[in-house]
Image: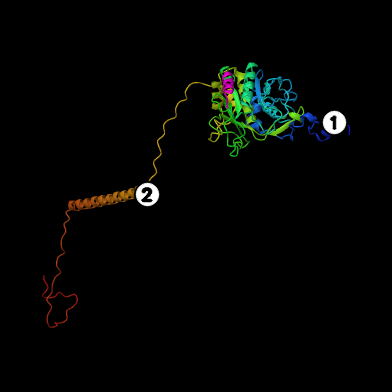
Amino acid sequence: MRPWSRVLLGGLVVGLVGVIVPVTPASAADCASAGDLPGAAWPRTMLATDSVSQLARGGGVTVAVLSTGVQAGNRQLAGRVLNGRDANADNGTANTDCRGLGTQVAGVIAAAVSAGNPVLGLAASATVLPVRVLPDNLSAQDATAQPNVLARGIEFAVNQGADVIVVAAQAYTDNDRLRTAVASAIAADIPVVAASGDLGSAQDKNPDPFPAAYPDVITVGAIDQNGKIFEKSGHGAYVDLVAPGVAVPTLQGGDAGPGGVIEADGTALAAGYVGATAALIRGRTGRMPVADLTRLLTASASPTVNGEAFGAGVVNPYGAVTGKATAKRGRALPALSAAAPSRSGAENQRRVVAFAGATLAAVAVVAVLMITAAVRRSRRQHWRPGLAPPLPEYDEPVEPGPPVMLLDTPTNSPR
């Protein structure tokens, strides 16, 4: 079969079954593929995306996405993806995406509404600045970046005037250039939102991710639709917030075509949601110090269970957009009395003996009082104790006398 015949046959199959599977050229054989079209987007409900969009959509805000590039041809991102830069070689553009991760992150940030498609970005009017920090020749499971490459990507984003920087890939080694690049962005009031990484399981030993572990970076972990932490989510004291990151319907790059959709996992997607929330705040209130923005995001977060994996809680876009940060110190709650200490067995026995003794003493006192009252009352009534008078005595004859009638008075009876 000739090549053009295979292309035609592939197009007919797509038209018949309605699944987006374009023919992939040989040079892009390792590109990502789209999965089944998700039926619903649970993060859209959890984060109240449709309600927030009535207040802010991120128009005029540029969000830099440091990942694998972003597919500019996706119809839900059309016209809002800049050329960007490939930071691996510090040359070329990043508006294509063979591996797909960058397009997935851009989808949760800025995907426009599309009929019959559940995917909708939280900041659907924002512009995406793609920065490729992961080369295309790595496996799709390897999302580890080099610190110097991340530093170049952040420097490029700052120089291009990005309003928010989302670092979706992590380095697990630290260096001075990366620290300096992050410090420069913070000094320019550009928030750096970083994923906590997907090596948080016991098997992966949860190494420290960079720049996520830096104190001024807004670090994000991932949760599922039940609020449980993603089993691979990196965790530590550096985590500030969590956001949806399991079975998230989003856009797909690679060979998925202009409308590819997939369900994806990972803290990179969670970082995208927080980055989009930062974009909404900047689009609505303008530039503010990163410390104030961080305080607004964490103070408005929805509470979760305690734990270093959850930070301050789940990002709350509606609360963050409608809230206001303040430097005033909160009023302290009233003091509470300390709980009574636990009692030992000896202490309990002493308490029982003391209670029994007190009870007996009380009974004795009551008895004495009752006797005293009775005596006093008898004296008032002139009562004295005495003996009964002796019974009368009769002389009994030795010999029986004449019969005595029952009612007759004896002759010798006293008168």
Image position, residue 321 (x, y; %): 59, 23
Residue type highlighted by circle 2? Gly
Range covered by the magenta-colored residues? 174-184
Residue type highlighted by circle 1? Val
**Is disc 2 surrounded by few (<14), some (14 to 19) or many (20+) residues within 10 Å?**
few
Is 236 on the left-hand or right-hand side of 342? right
**Rounded to the nearest whole Å, what is the CA distance between mark 1 and mark 2?**
85 Å
**Principal SS element in the magenta part?**
helix
Q: Looking at the image, can residue 3 be seen?
A: yes
Is 248 on the left-hand or right-hand side of 25? left
Q: Which of the 4 image quarters holds residue 27?
A: top right
Label 1: element kind:
helix
Image position, residue 264 (x, y; %): 68, 33
**Tag on residue 67?**
none
Residue nearer the viewer, 201 or 283: 201
Residue nearer the viewer, 226 or 104: 104
Image position, residue 202 (x, y; %): 58, 39
Label 2: element kind:
helix
Q: Residue furthest bottom?
A: 399
Residue picked out by circle 1: 7
**Is disc 1 surrounded by few (<14), some (14 to 19) or many (20+) residues within 10 Å?**
few
Can you say whether 59 is above or below 120 in the image?
Answer: above
Residue picked out by circle 2: 345
Residue nearer the viewer, 356 or 382: 356
- Decide which of tag 1 and tag 2 comes sooner along the chain: 1
Image position, residue 90 (x, y; %): 68, 20
